[in-house]
Image: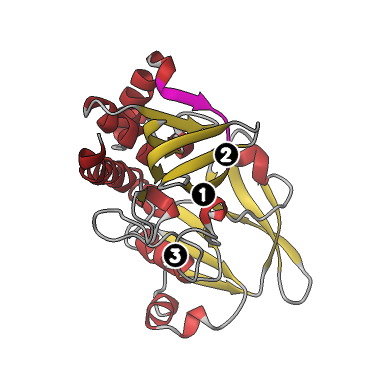
Amino acid sequence: MYDLIIIGGGPAGLTAAVYSIRKRLNVLLVTKDLGGKTNFRLALPWIQDYQVISGLEVVNKFRTELEYLDFARHMEDVEKVARKNGSFAVTTKGGAELEAKAVILATGARQVRMRVPGEKEFTMKGLCYSALSYAPLFIDRTAIVIGDGDLALRSAAELATVAKQVSIVCGGDKILATPLGKKLMALDKVTVLKDYEVVEVLGDEYARALRLRDPSGKVADHKADGIFVEKALTPNSDIVKDTVDLDGRGQIEVDRENRTSVPGLFAAGDVTNNFNEQVLIAIGEGAKAALSAYEYLLPKL
């Protein structure tokens, strides 16, 4: 029986694990990899690594510590989390059943992809899924944003504050009728490509253009310095969908102390309904979840 099991090895999970170990808890991190989304970083031809401030260095320090501590990690996907006699049973895809007095879920979220030729080859090579992370790098550059929701609008708006030209590929009038949509449509530097269909991502070492089909069926290539797919995020919450309260998007609902609707079950990072999907925010949420779990466990240690 562990004091605490942490599920997920991204920024939130790694931070929670290191904080918990330093609290001398008997903790196990269960994950298929260490680093999560920080294993992927957008490469742009005009940018060097030293020009970018990110949480990668912090995450790498935590990852190195966990790589050294073999006893504190179990490298496997989790299939289910369930309550069991006042504690929790964590079942892995390999069939292992691990028990703990408390659990932190830090399973993150996955992006909705376009599934077109060239997307996989150019992912993180001029094409990525987080304009909010990289918008400051696009001063006097051109960018294309693809998406139909609030995330796409916010991404385009942030890019428009610095970029020379921003194009939005969207599928309807709904988001354009919002206050932010109307503001973007009024900007000379923003072009709305309504009802255009993405056919292919084109490039050399980096993505350089999108091949688009307009509503009439005509196909043309649209060049850009960067391409951002901002369709949506799907939280990896299926393993607890029958256990904790989820919001309408499937995110785990947590309070300011990262507590879920189930005592002893905590959550942190992109799988939760906390504000914004950023590495540095996930790091902070992971620390909060670990401290909350420690407070919960104190009477039980």
* Residue 244: % across, % down: 45, 60
- Residue shown at the point (66%, 41%) measured from the top left: 120
* Mark 3: amino acid: Asp
The quarter of the picture where the C terminus appears is top left
* Mark 2: amino acid: Thr
What range of the chain is rendered magenta?
Answer: 72-79
Q: Residue furthest front?
A: 85
80 relative to 60 in the view: left or right: right
* Mark 1: amino acid: Ala
On the question of residue 287 being in view, the answer is yes
Q: Main secondary structure of the magenta part?
A: strand
Which residue is tagged 3? 245
The residues bearing labels 1 and 2 have C-alpha atoms spaced at a distance of: 8 Å
Q: Which label is found at residue 222?
A: none
- Residue shown at the point (52%, 47%) measured from the top left: 81
Q: Secondary structure at mark 3?
A: loop
Q: Which label is found at residue 91?
A: 2
Callout 1 touching callout 3 (CB < 8 Å): no
Front in this rendered view, residue 271 or 244: 244
Which residue is tagged 1? 82
Callout 1 touching callout 2 (CB < 8 Å): yes
